[in-house]
Image (tube, grey):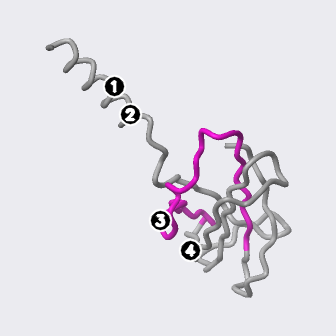
Amino acid sequence: MRKIIYAFFFLLSTHFFGQSPSRINYQGIVRDNAGSPLANKNVNLQFVILQGASPGTAVFTETQSVQTNSMGLFSVQIGSSSNLGSVNFYSGTYSLQVNLDANGSNNFSPMGSPQL
């Protein structure tokens, strides 16, 4: 009986360590076309998680407004305003498409789509 209880707790504990992340830390530097950092500027970022290689099927979308620091740096947590837990990261490959709106006009430009 004791072995069954230990086996149950072992299986239960491995389930807790296999959870998907509820947030993903993301950091970047915003630069203009000349390569100079956009310091102390409000920008809009759109994060799209695509299932499969880019272009893939969008399974998650989130938009965040942030302010860059004096060197153009920003830090965000993807999933802070939407439910990132709804993405099943175990069901194939995913990529993260990052879109930037540096003018506040909701006119986003793609910045890249690295695989997660």
Q: CA distance from mark 2 to mark 3?
A: 23 Å
* Mark nearer the N terminus (2 vs 3): 2
Dot 2 falls on a residue whose secondary structure is helix
Q: Earlier in the sequence, mark 4 or mark 1?
A: 1
Q: Which residue is mark 3?
A: 80
SS type, badge 1: helix
Q: CA distance from mark 3 to mark 4?
A: 13 Å
Residue name at image x 60 percent, y 44 percent: 89
At a point 58% along the width and 71% down the height, the residue shown is 68
Residue 15, numbered label: 2
| Residue 91, placed above or below residue 51 | above
Element carrying mark 4: strand
Q: Which residues are magenta?
A: 71-100
Residue 101 image offset from top left, x and y in percent: 73, 76
Up-down relation of residue 5 to residue 94 (above or below): above
Toward the viewer: 98 or 68?
Answer: 98
Residue 48 at x, y percent in the picture? 69, 62
Sequence-first tag of 1 and 3: 1
How far apart in space, not on screen, are marks 1 and 3 (Cα)? 30 Å
Magenta-drawn stretch contains 85: yes
Circle 2/circle 1 CB separation < 8 Å: yes
Q: Nearer the viewer, mark 4 or mark 2?
A: 2
Amino acid type at image mark 1: Leu
Q: Residues within 10 Å of mark 4 (few under 14, many from 20)?
A: some
Per the image, the residue denoted by label 1 is: 11
Q: In the image, is residue 79 part of the stretch drawn in magenta?
A: yes
- Position of 94 with respect to 19 (left or right) is right
Tell which of 101 and 18 is nearer to you: 18
Disc 2 versus disc 1: distance between alpha carbons?
6 Å
> Which residue shows up at 49% across the image and 70% down it?
81
